[in-house]
Image (spheres, rainbow, N blue to C red):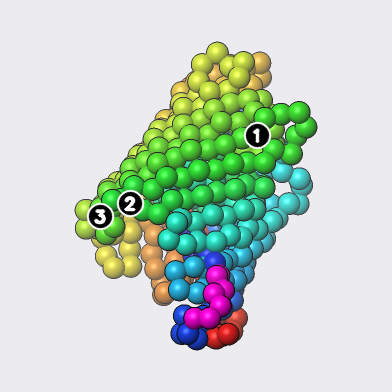
Amino acid sequence: MHVAARVRSFAVLSLIGLPPSVLAIDYEATADASLAYSGSHYESDVMGDDSNGHSNGSWAGVSLAATQNDYRAFLVYQYGFERFNESIPNAAPGDREREFFGGIASPFGTLGYGRQSSFYKQSGRDLDPFFDTSVVGFNGVFAAEGASYGLSNLTNAFNDEAVAYASPVIEGFSLRLSYFMDQAANTDEDYGVGLRYAPEDGPLVVGVEYLDSDGGDAVFGVGKLVPFDAVRVYGSIRWNALALGASYERVDVENEADPRNYTLLSATYQIMPKLTLAGTLGYLKDVVPNAAASPDGIDGEGLTLGAFYELMPRLTTYIAARGVRLDSDADTETYAVGVNYAFEFELFPGFGLAR
């Protein structure tokens, strides 16, 4: 199971004339990685059969942080061992830089800038138990990383020159704002707005995320560099060992007759301390990236089932299977066995510096 990086966010203030205990600054430098590999067998009515081994979004990174009282500055860098997403049209071949951003967190919220995952992406990724395994693929065909069938390709993207702000949590509510500095000339900028409700230590998380893009290079993933807007409504709830999640996306792309509709239902159940069962059900409607070449697009239903077992702390194995039935009769099946090792260690112990 994919183990995401524990990103440390946040900042430093220097105040003159206060006691040394107030002026103390704590520094941290941490290296972390997710090493995920699998063997899989893929069957397609159109593309034929194939068996192979894959890296599942493996990466290594480093994070730096400096903290003083309630303020924390951070810098995060992640490098992928494979190109992060073959399906994104404007990703340069061999591009392996996943995230590179910095920012500051304070009692007034968290502000970051750089190449990073959008809040829209994060809200879908967190509901997908098979994210970055060999039973994913937003379009129904084989993929070795990214989102499951039932989530749009917007759940896969990393965004350059992104400014992201998350407000403090007040009574469980948090406002999330994004601004994407478009590199294309003579176009408007792209932005995102979201609201999340997650009471502290509560079992419920619900929210909504909205994206508006002029079709430039900042927010990508619809398969066309044309204007679009997208909204995701999502939620999850946990009862002891059982967790349920749901995501619905409506992506309205310019010059397409109907908005694209993506629905994902997910569930996990921890039947033993080290063994977790998982499943997702995906449904796509009116998703027609290329009407001339594929009149039925990639509409259909997909079911994924699997089990994750923790061999030891940070080392997890899984076995999973996925079947996708497309309206175009281009059905696919995927079977995979994989392993993920995630680690984190301090490059040097944190220490304080009093001025």
Q: Look at label 1 and name its amino acid.
A: Glu
Q: Which residue is mark 1?
A: 189
Measure the alpha-carbon separation of dots 2 and 1. 29 Å
**Dots 2, 1 in contact, CB < 8 A:** no
* Residue 26 picture location, percent across and down: 53, 79
Which portion, as a residue range, is magenta?
12-18
Helix, strand or loop under label 1: loop
Question: In the rendered view, would you say 226 is above or below 55?
Answer: above
Magenta stretch holds residue 150: no
Q: Residue at x 45, y 56 (%)?
A: 108
Measure the alpha-carbon separation of dots 3 and 1. 36 Å
Helix, strand or loop under label 3: loop
Q: Look at label 3 and name its amino acid.
A: Gly
Q: Residues within 10 Å of mark 3 (few under 14, many from 20)?
A: few
- The residue most toward the front is 17
Work out whether residue 48 or residue 245 is closer to the camera in this orientation and state it: 245
Magenta stretch holds residue 14: yes
Query: Disc number at residue 202?
Result: 3
The mark lying in front, picked from 3 and 1, is 1
Whichever of labels 3 and 2 marks the residue nearer the N terminus, that label is 2
Question: In the rendered view, would you say 14 is above or below 2?
Answer: below
Question: In the rendered view, would you say 99 is above or below 342?
Answer: above
Residue 214 position by quadrant: top right
Q: Residue at x 72, y 43 (%)?
A: 91
Q: Look at label 2 and name its amino acid.
A: Ile
* Residue 3 picture location, percent across and down: 48, 62
The mark lying in front, picked from 3 and 2, is 2
Whichever of labels 2 and 1 marks the residue nearer the N terminus, that label is 2
Viewer can see residue 164: yes
**Dots 3, 1 in contact, CB < 8 A:** no
Q: Which residue is mark 2?
A: 170
